[in-house]
Image (cartoon, rainbow, N blue to C red):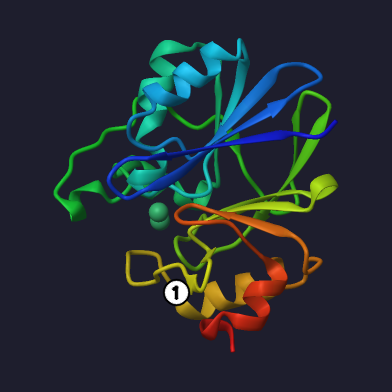
Amino acid sequence: MGLEIITLVLGPLQNNTYLLRDPATERCAVIDPSFDSQEVLAEIDRRSLKLEMILLTHAHFDHIYGVNEITAKISGVSVGLHPADLPLWRQGGGSELFGLKFTPTEQPSIHFYNNQHLTLGGEKLEVKHTPGHSRGHVIFHYAPDKIVFCGDLIFQGNIGRTDLPGGSMQELLHSIRTQVLTLPPETRLYSGHGPSTTVGKESETNSYLA
Ligand SMILES: [Zn+2]
Ligand SMILES: [Zn+2]
């Protein structure tokens, strides 16, 4: 019995916030809580889940905005981020560039590194460092069901923007080629925005990767 994935599309940038539920233990993790995270809290409450971790693919404000709201309501939740995105985190995720003001109240307590294993109940996720969209961008690979949560690294028919501070097109393409396109083609990619896709579909049709 693998992880159940509940997708919530939240906020003005149509962010995908993912709730991962381990059915064996009813423990859960949230990936990239965005705006309107009271919807995440409602879902956790409705299903009587125990939230253990908030996992962040990167520290852009639209992916971290819900952390304050969730940790204010549920105590003892670990927040995970790659240390290379800590400066971005402290700056509110670049929110000022978008005319917003956001100040994180928490400090990340899990410091991600490449090939790190995370445990949720009886299930394991692997962290892969994928810089290019931001310096500390990571993706989460759930190998048993061939699933990757890939944040703003790659989208259906598109790739992450590299024009924001810390961005690099060369690094982004390298990250995609070494950490995503090396996976089995049927591997499903759950992106930070838009519909899910697969490794095979993107390697064949994504014009940015030609
Ligand atoms: Zn981003
Ligand atoms: Zn984003």
Q: x, y percentage for residue 195?
A: 52, 56
Out of 193 and 56, give the one closest to the viewer: 193
In the picture provided, is 28 more to the left or to the right than 12? Answer: right
Q: Residue at x 54, y 74 (%)?
A: 171
Task: Give the residue at mark 1.
Answer: 168
Q: Residue at x 39, y 71 (%)?
A: 162
Q: Quadrant of residue 196?
A: bottom right
Relative vertical location of residue 121 with respect to residue 125 in this rendering, above or below: above
Circle 1: element type: loop
Out of 28 and 95, give the one closest to the viewer: 28
The amino acid marked with disc number 1 is: Ser
Q: Residue at x 62, y 44 (%)?
A: 112
Quadrant of ligand 2: it is: bottom left
Q: Residue at x 39, y 15 (%)?
A: 72
Out of 204 and 78, give the one closest to the viewer: 204
| Residue at the bottom extreme, as displayed | 210
Q: Quadrant of residue 23?
A: top right
Q: x, y percentage for residue 146?
A: 78, 53
In which quadrant of the rendered image does the N terminus lie?
A: top right
In the picture provided, is 137 more to the left or to the right than 106? Answer: right
Q: Quadrant of residue 37?
A: top left
Relative vertical location of residue 29 with respect to residue 125 in this rendering, above or below: above
In which quadrant of the rendered image does the C terminus lie?
A: bottom right
Q: Residues within 10 Å of mark 1 (few under 14, many from 20)?
A: some
Q: x, y percentage for residue 14?
A: 36, 48
In the picture provided, is 85 more to the left or to the right than 163? Answer: right
Q: x, y percentage for residue 103?
A: 27, 33
